[in-house]
Structure formats: structure tokens, C-alpha cells
Image (cartoon, helix red, strand yellow):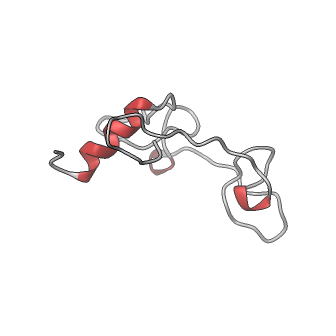
Amino acid sequence: MYKTSSERWSLCKAWCKKKLCSRKECANYAKNGGVCIRHGAKVKRCSSKGCTNHAKIGGVCKKHGAKVKLCRCRFEGCSSEA
């Protein structure tokens, strides 16, 4: 059905309302300034003592209480998170 896993992954991302990195041919999600971490976005770290995970909501990671809504792919036959 798909030639590569990146083709399938791009379909999943297309269904979700999250923005993609503005760099040409990059399929990662944009974090800050319209670019992904690989292309220079700065991300905040969890504020819990000793934790190095990325902060999601309220300055903490999922492990320390951030509630993150998952976006599921709606493409027929796909069960991936988009």
C-alpha cells in the first residue's frame, strides 16, 4: 500500500491539525517558531526536580502530570497516533 514508512507517517500527520516544520521536505512537527527541534526550535524542560523530559502543559512532562490529548489518524485502516 505504501512504498515507505515515511509515506504512511505523512498521511497520519496530514489528518492532525498540528503544524509541520516549515523546512523543505521535513515531516516533523513544528515546536517553536514554525520549525522542529532538529531545525532549531527551543523546547522547555520539565520543572520537576531532576527531570530532563520536555515540558508539555503547565511546565511539566506527561510523567509529572501534564494531560495531553492524542490525535489519532483517521485514515481507513490506520491505528497510528498522528
* Residue 14 screen position, x and y as percent: 38, 31
Residue at (42, 48) in percent of width and height: 80
Which residue corresponds to the image point at 73% horizontal and 62% vertical from the top-left?
63
**Spot occupied by residue 58 in the image (x, y as percentages of width and height):** 81, 44
In the image, is 53 to the left or to the right of 30?
right
Residue 21 as seen in the image, left or right of residue 26: right
In this rendering, position of residue 61 left or right of residue 48:
left
Which residue is at the front of the view, 53 or 80? 80
Q: Is residue 10 above or below residue 54?
A: above
Q: Is residue 52 left or right of residue 2?
A: right
Residue placed furthest toward the bottom: 50
Tell which residue pokes out farthest to the right in this image: 49
Instruction: Name which quarter of the figure residue 20 lies in.
Output: top left
Q: In the displayed structure, would residue 46 be above or below residue 70?
A: below
Image quarter of the C terminus = top left
Identify the residue at horizontal 58%, vertical 43% (top origin): 70
Q: Residue at x 40, y 37 (%)?
A: 13
